[in-house]
Amino acid sequence: MPIDAATALAAPPRTNDIAWDSKDVLLYHLGVGAGAHRPATDPDELRYTYEKDLQVLPSFVTVAGGGLAKAGVFTLPGLRIDLSQVLHGGQRIELHRPVPVAGSGVLTSRLAAVYDKGKAAVLVMRSEAADDQGPLWTCDTEVFVRGEGGFGGERGSSTRTPPPERVPEWEQEVPVRHDQALLYRLSGDWNPLHADPDFAKLAGFDRPILHGLCSYGTTLKTVVDTALGGDASRVLSYSTRFAGIFFPGETLRVRIWDLGGGRLSVTATAVERADAPVLADTVLTHQ
């Protein structure tokens, strides 16, 4: 079998040294659309794009120091996976304290779960970063591997967290640049699906699609700017399910519901395609 869940789950954690600086943070922020909508020198945008008073958008942790690529989930013993069959299913980050503008630490990664969905396998990789002051963040990355189910494993839960059936407290349309994927990939995700039209066609798309984690970061920035007073340090956790594709040049519609108790429910859809879902089951907790 391509997936031997017991062997993969028994593999020891992997550790990697990671480091980043303000240049990495600035590049990531540009990659998720900072500075593109208001005047570039608006103070509210400069807090993402200028080193003076720079803050760090928490979703940066998915690329910091090499990001999720350092986890090495697809090279674990017990896994032989065709990468063309892999889809990013979901992402959750938890911040133990605000991310510093520059830092270094150790990233410890392990396979936390393997689920059997019948026609697909679901792998959950947990990555935890810490520095000499203690824990920094935890990332849970969920990937679907098509065609690799049916190995007799646990199915796992399918809990959904839809938004309330009422008008959202905030709604924002965010035009996304035509070159957004080309900017975002400079933070470390070099998948040609997001740049090469011929490769995109082989994958079944008429043109390159935007990275799911780029939509994830763009949506988070919108939530911080509209619902959290522009203060990224207030974010405690942020989870989502990748519900559909998004193309560079489209408009992202972000809707935000205040659930009370420091919880927000969020959706992101593609305006030009009749609000086709992009991010769903999205919940942010904050202080």
Image: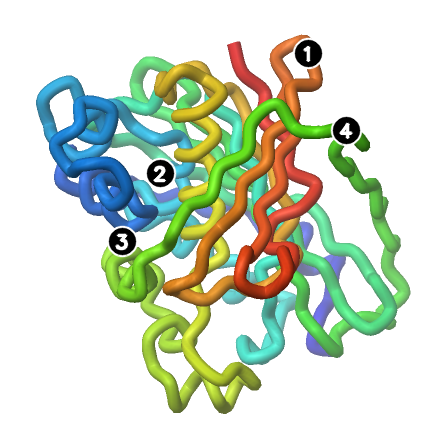
Alpha carbons under labels 4 and 2: distance apart: 31 Å
Q: Nearer the viewer, mark 3 or mark 4?
A: 4
| Circle nearer the N terminus (2, 1) | 2
> Looking at the picture, which amino acid does disc 4 mark?
Arg
Check disc 3 and report the residue beneath it: 187
Check disc 1 and report the residue beneath it: 260
Judging depth in this view, the residue of 78 and 253 nearest the camera is 253
Q: Secondary structure at mark 4?
A: loop
Say few, some or many: other residues with alpha carbon within 10 Å of mark 2 (under 14 / 14 to 19 / 20 or more). many
Check disc 4 and report the residue beneath it: 166
Q: Nearer the viewer, mark 4 or mark 2?
A: 4
| Circle nearer the N terminus (1, 3) | 3
| Circle nearer the N terminus (1, 4) | 4
- Would you identify the image quadrant in which residue 194 lies? bottom left
Alpha carbons under labels 3 and 2: distance apart: 9 Å
Whole-percent x, y for residue 26 in the image: 19, 39
> Looking at the picture, which amino acid does disc 1 mark?
Gly
Q: Secondary structure at mark 1?
A: strand
Q: Say whether marks 2 and 1 touch (CB < 8 Å).
A: no
